[in-house]
Image: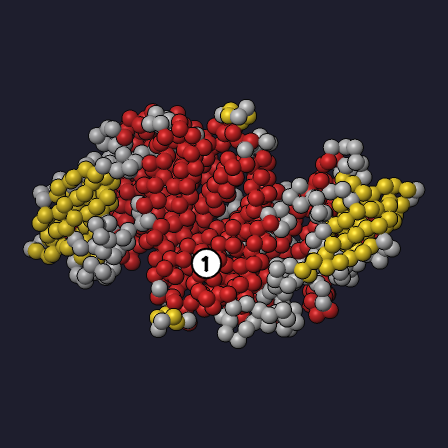
Amino acid sequence: MNFAFTKEEEAFRAEVREFISGAMTDEIPSRWLGGLLDTPARQDFVTKMADKGWLSIGFPEKYGGTESTMPLAQYVLNEELHMAQAPIVGKNLGVVVNTLLHQGSEELKQEFVPRILRNEIQWALAYTEPDAGSDLANMQCRAVLDGDEYVINGQKRFITSAHFADYMWTGVRTDPDAPKHKGISLLIIDMDSPGITITPIWTIIGERTNDVFLDNVRVPKERLVGEENKGWQYITEALTYERFAMTSIAPTVRKFQRFVDFVKETEVDGKRLADDPVVRRKIARLSVLVEIGRMLDFRCVAMAVKPDYVPYIEAAMNKMWGGIVETEMSDQFLDILGPHGYLWKDREANASEDALLDGDVADDYLWAGHQRVAAAGVDISKNIIARRYLNLPSS
Amino acid sequence: MDMEFTEEQRQLMNTARSFLEKECPSALVRELETSDLGFSPGLWRKMANLGWLGLPFPDEYGGYDLGVIDLVVLGKELGRVLCPSPYIPTVVLAGGAIAAAGSEEQKKTHLPRIISGEELIAFALQESGGSYSGRGIKTTATETDGGYVLSGTKMFVEFAEAADRLLVVAHTSGDADSTDGLTMFLLDAKSAGVKLTPLSTLARDRQYRVDLTDVKVPGDDILGPVDGAWPLLEKTVHTGVVTLCAYMVGASETIHHMANEFAKERIQFGRPIGSFQAIQHYLAQTITEIIGADTLTIYAAWALDNDLPHRTIVAKAKSFTGDTFKQASSIGAQIHGGLGYNEEVDTTLFLRRGKQYQLSMGDSGHWEDVIAEELLDN
């Protein structure tokens, strides 16, 4: 039993911190968890990391990867990036590269993996539809093989990176007669293809996501990932990578520490907030919940580095806990701030002059609700734990 | 990072599990609730024969030199069957204090006898109006010719009636609000002026109020430095707390498992109640909390074993694990419906202990105050 990082991992952490302090600019931090690569500044930042070989750690050299003796390198890297609110390296690597390496054809691996590891191409993940949310396997976006091409018709919703991505990693229905989990396939769609229309959806904190409409979009059949009608298996495996890579506890730790510093230096009615017994108990209680998040994170990571083990359950537990802690924490923080808590930001994301902590806590409160439901949220995670771990019968 | 137990630790776990399943069924737990001693001397001897009572002690006194993580491994198994025993007060707390602070003579006298199961020592720290810490101790020890005179009242002293000795923490100087000026005494439990009053508890375990009225204690019974007990005792207390956390994790796993199996079998509305999301979500959240508590308990043990700062982490572990056991036992009974509150169903054994252990050895509020001090006052 050992909870410490190795000397090598700690040295790597120091190197990452040094890199971040050199490469970070005001344009880079993002309010989205994990940070979208939607601006040149953020893309440049990640390309600099790619140049250092940090996107390719642990992947096979044959596809542009870098051998590593540090199984936790990617975890350490993401933890530091999260702490700095910089874009993490999780989404493209976690979902697309892992799935391609496990299931993709040799041609797809060679075509895409090296370019992803160099940060030359951006991806949008497209599973959700208006009628396929929690019931993700209900996706209806249809792909029909016509000669050497699939023809795709349908709609995808909440496709966060669609407006700047080069490719869309898309779940489509290839067999409408099979049970719903067994008729889904994964296709790589070029965003320049004719027939794609993208319209924005604005979230409550003013970040952009999208509806994507596909009207007779044609995709070469070689862009099928793995086997036809096995897409659901690939998607659920990859959702695990996403839950693990994107829901790190680090952002929560960062917000918690910032707030602790705040209550130590803030007075209400002439008394230090940190001396108020109710505030003290609240902060202590939250620190325990955050610590449990860190423990579930550790478990997830420790399992994820085991060969051939997909930490499906650990990731679901992590995801569930993250949603619970974020909502609880931001709500309690607003309670401590009192009426100042509702001083928010204007439409250009500028905080009002009298707002405390730049109005970020109000953002966090709104955002936490989103985190409870995004990418298989708290309740869906509980379903997964109940069925897959506790073997409870389906209803 | 490596979250695996060693081969030896897994062996200890397996041995303990099969031994305790056989030797400590719930019928025994019930029987001991109404017995005089509150534990089984026969089972205690067998635990001694298995070497469990020597786990944390140096091998020169007959121990096994193992760490807090090993105590956690065993503690979880004891908790899994709700085994009533003086393991925490005698081995972890009193034994730990003797190993940490005792003279060579005291170690040679007491440790082998603790290890063999011949000597029971009760641990008398907490008092009414005081938290589970070195604060709030009003008991005093006044020096007289050749010894000390102790006066005061200790609360929540487990197995005091069966004990050969009492480890009493008293002020030789300083005042009740301070941890300065505390001294440990290892006095004969049958000393004149020691009066035991049994306390009826939720868990129906053996706890006592111990009134000390001008109890004369020879100077030889001082354990560790005069006026300097707390710095040596704090780590031992933390080790005891972490062992209780492990016990609670094991107990939580059992009650969760009982509820989970019940939910698969119990048919209402024509189907197993475990197919309803209301039930599934309770069980899913509770198991996640148990796994979190388990990992945090092991983390705290690891910090103690490696001499890392451990005050906050132990505080977090006790606070969360206590809440988790309370919640798991409460949800566990609830899922059993009316049956869950039926005396003869084992859920009630857990339900009563779940709330008691959350409050004992420092309730969640106490440990939250400790966390707040560490986070906000430096």
Q: Residue furthest right?
A: A147
Instruction: Give the total number of marks visible in the rendering.
Output: 1
What secondary structure is found at the residue carrying circle 1?
Answer: helix
Query: Seen from this angle, which residue lies furthest left?
Result: B145
Please report the residue visible at 85 percent of the width from the left and 41 percent of the height from the top.
Answer: A144
Query: Is residue A303 placed above or below B228 in the rendered structure?
Result: above
**Residue B223 appears at what percent x and percent y?**
21, 51
Residue A54's image quarter? bottom right
Give the percent coordinates (x, y) of residue B268: 51, 25
| Residue in the image at 35% along x and 64% along y | A276
Q: Position of residue B27 (x, y in %)?
A: 34, 24
Q: Residue tagged by mark 1?
A: A332
**Where B317 falls versus A345 (above or below)?**
above
Q: Is residue A205 left or right of residue A109?
A: left
Residue at 29%, 55% (x, y): give it. B232
Looking at this view, is B149 or B59 the one in front?
Answer: B149
Q: Where, quadrant-wise, is the C terminus of chain A in this rendering?
A: top right
Residue A247 visible? The answer is yes
Residue at x 56% of width, y 63% of height: A363
Q: Nearer the viewer, residue A325 or A315?
A: A325
Q: Chain of mark 1?
A: A
Horizontal side of B327 relative to B155 (left or right) equals: right
The answer to whether A218 appears left or right of B6 in the picture is right
Viewer can see residue A86: no
